[in-house]
Image (cartoon, grey):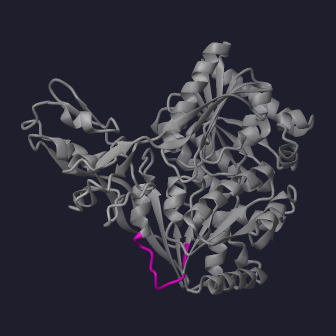
């Protein structure tokens, strides 16, 4: 079974839920899919080993063959090539690696060159099998790195995916292959607004889901009211507590100090597993 | 005209609450560049004056009556956006046009894609530029560029000297689009190991694009040791701490009342935010 932990709003507690859940069930795979700001290992503290440098193709122009006809830059919808009278400039940051320039070049002057966009690392925390991806600074190819990272999913295991925030491509790419989504929110107006956006996305893809309310006790009752009206199960409420907040600030998964929560996470997980039937 | 962007790397550190507080103190155009999960409008309650459709990258469309099932498009697509039965997977299509080019029977056409809306609005604090991305759409970086362009036009029209931009979380495309070319970024962080980790990455991004950065430590008293770590890190990097704000439930209370913290309370927090704002205004006038 693959479970994604996601939210519209950032900072609601996705990583808190993902790491505490993973540590509670123990024998599982956890993949931190927030390649822009990966934080799960702040809590796992696994020794990480680099397993892959992720590269993408960008065009390289052979100036001997090129006659500066301009067909490549005309075709490129991303403005990643500029043809000057004497040379062709390539802007790797804009290139989507679609291959169009190479196809349209009448003189076969374009070949592929690989450039790195980030890396994938692997580690273990007890029985937990853990991967994360780290996007290079200044790089925009979040999706390409995420796609490579998702190839590490081991379908024979119970898999937990810690999703990036938002409701656009990186979040959707993460959750699209999941059997179940846990949406983490907080009981505030911002939390509710962004939860509704996330619910729209998850419903449009058609993945079964439930909600965890984090920092329960702050704000107001409107998130719970909303869930009740929409028939969305509230899977768990994590109280707003100084102890949990302090452990979080120190990078400690709270189940390791508050044993009673291990069972709560486990029970929730096996309820979901039963519902999904995998 | 000066531009200030408020970002954080990590989500949920208080970007939008602080942006809203600045909005109530400044004479500026407001721009919400967190187009993916925007919240600033929940406080500013914009009165929309103009709404425009936003077209992201085009998307391929197949005319099945012309398709001869040669699969050339399927084989050429680098995004996995065409399945073996030659159906377009809209979420995966990046609009490159390769399929249209390789199709021998002209069965594929690139068509406009409705990806979101941009808005020009009025608020009680001044004009506002914002946007919404449609569910499951991409190209948020381009929509951010539209929001910033509209904000510049508003600044000219209303004679404003400053644009305050609420940025998205992360370090990727929409963030880069929100900070390139601005005069200053304010990075809002908190004294947690995760936030510090993200702070270091976002400061690297700002440096990479040559944008000066200052830091605000929000909820500094939830872990004073970690706050000291952040102060040490910033001082080593030569980065100014523009302000330190204590943990206070007034942020949530103000949010529930749809007010900025400064409007909602005359307490200590508001005083500290005002002091931070004065410091930032000074830096901007020198930038």
Question: Which secondary structure type mostly characterizes the magenta part of the structure?
Answer: loop
**Figure quadrant of residue B4:** top right
Q: Is residue A155 magenta?
A: yes
Which residue is located at x 73 percent, y 38 percent?
Answer: B41
> Is there any visible trace of residue B46 in the rendered image?
yes
Range covered by the magenta-colored residues: A151-160
Q: Give coordinates of residue B286: x percent, y percent.
A: 62, 18
Foreground: B260 or A19?
Answer: B260
Q: Give coordinates of residue A51: x percent, y percent.
A: 37, 69
Foreground: B192 or B107?
Answer: B107
**Figure quadrant of residue A271:** bottom right
Q: Give coordinates of residue B174: x percent, y percent.
A: 52, 42
In the picture, measured across the screen, residue A30 lies left or right of residue B101, that is right
Foreground: A41 or A145?
Answer: A145
Q: Give coordinates of residue B2: x percent, y percent.
A: 61, 21
Q: Is residue A92 magenta?
A: no
Quadrant where the N terminus of chain B sits is: top right
Q: Is residue B77 above or below residue A278?
A: above
């Amino acid at each position: 079974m693959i479970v994604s932990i996601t939210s519209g709003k950032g900072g609601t507690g996705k990583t808190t839920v993902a790491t505490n859940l993973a540590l509670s069930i123990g024998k599982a795979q956890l993949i931190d899919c927030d390649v822009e700001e990966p934080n799960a290992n702040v809590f796992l503290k696994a020794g990480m080993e680099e397993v892959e440098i992720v590269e993408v193709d960008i065009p390289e122009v052979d100036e001997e063959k090129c006659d500066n006809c301009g067909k490549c830059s005309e075709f490129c919808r991303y403005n990643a090539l500029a043809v000057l009278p004497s040379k062709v400039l390539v802007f790797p940051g804009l290139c989507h690696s679609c291959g169009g320039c190479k196809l349209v070049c009448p003189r076969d002057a374009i070949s592929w060159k690989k450039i790195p966009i980030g890396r994938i690392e692997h580690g273990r925390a007890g029985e937990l099998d853990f991967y994360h991806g780290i996007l290079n600074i200044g790089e925009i190819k979040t999706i390409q790195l995420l796609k490579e990272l998702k190839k590490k999913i081991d379908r024979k295991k119970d898999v937990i995916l810690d999703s990036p925030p938002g409701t656009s491509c990186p979040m959707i790419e993460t959750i699209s292959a999941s059997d179940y989504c846990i949406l983490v929110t907080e009981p505030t107006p911002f939390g509710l607004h962004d939860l509704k956006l996330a619910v729209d996305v998850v419903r449009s893809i058609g993945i079964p889901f439930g909600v965890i309310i984090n920092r329960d006790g702050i704000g107001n009752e409107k998130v719970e009211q909303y869930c009740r009206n929409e028939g969305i199960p509230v899977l768990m409420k994590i109280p707003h507590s100084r102890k949990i907040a302090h452990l979080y600030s120190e990078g400690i998964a709270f189940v390791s100090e508050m044993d009673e929560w291990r069972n709560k996470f486990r029970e929730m997980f096996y309820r979901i597993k039963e519902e999904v039937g995998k | 005209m000066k531009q200030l962007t408020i970002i954080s790397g990590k989500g949920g550190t208080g970007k939008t609450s602080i942006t809203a507080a600045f909005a109530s103190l400044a004479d500026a155009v407001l721009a919400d560049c967190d187009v993916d999960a925007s919240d600033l409008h929940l406080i500013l309650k914009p009165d929309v004056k103009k709404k425009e459709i936003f077209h992201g990258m085009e998307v391929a469309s197949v005319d099945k009556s012309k398709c001869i099932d040669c699969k050339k498009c399927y084989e050429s697509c680098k995004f996995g956006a065409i399945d073996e039965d030659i159906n377009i997977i809209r979420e995966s299509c990046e609009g490159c046009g390769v399929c249209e080019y390789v199709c021998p029977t002209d069965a594929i056409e690139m068509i406009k894609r409705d990806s979101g809306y941009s808005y020009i609005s009025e608020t009680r604090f001044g004009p506002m530029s914002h946007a919404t991305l449609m569910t499951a759409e991409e190209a948020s970086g381009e929509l951010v560029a539209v929001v910033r362009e509209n904000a510049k036009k508003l600044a000219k029209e209303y004679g404003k000297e400053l644009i305050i931009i609420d940025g998205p979380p992360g370090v990727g495309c929409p963030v880069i689009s929100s900070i390139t070319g601005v005069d200053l970024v304010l990075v809002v962080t908190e004294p947690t190991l995760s936030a510090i980790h993200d702070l270091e990455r976002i400061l690297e991004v700002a440096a990479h694009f040559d944008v000066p950065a200052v830091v605000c430590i929000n909820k500094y008293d939830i872990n004073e040791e970690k706050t000291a770590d952040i102060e040490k890190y910033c001082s080593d990097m030569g980065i100014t701490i523009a302000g330190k704000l204590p943990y206070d439930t007034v942020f949530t209370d103000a949010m529930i009342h749809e007010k900025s913290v400064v409007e909602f309370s005359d307490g200590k927090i508001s005083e500290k935010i005002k002091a931070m704002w004065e410091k930032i205004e000074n830096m901007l006038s020198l930038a």
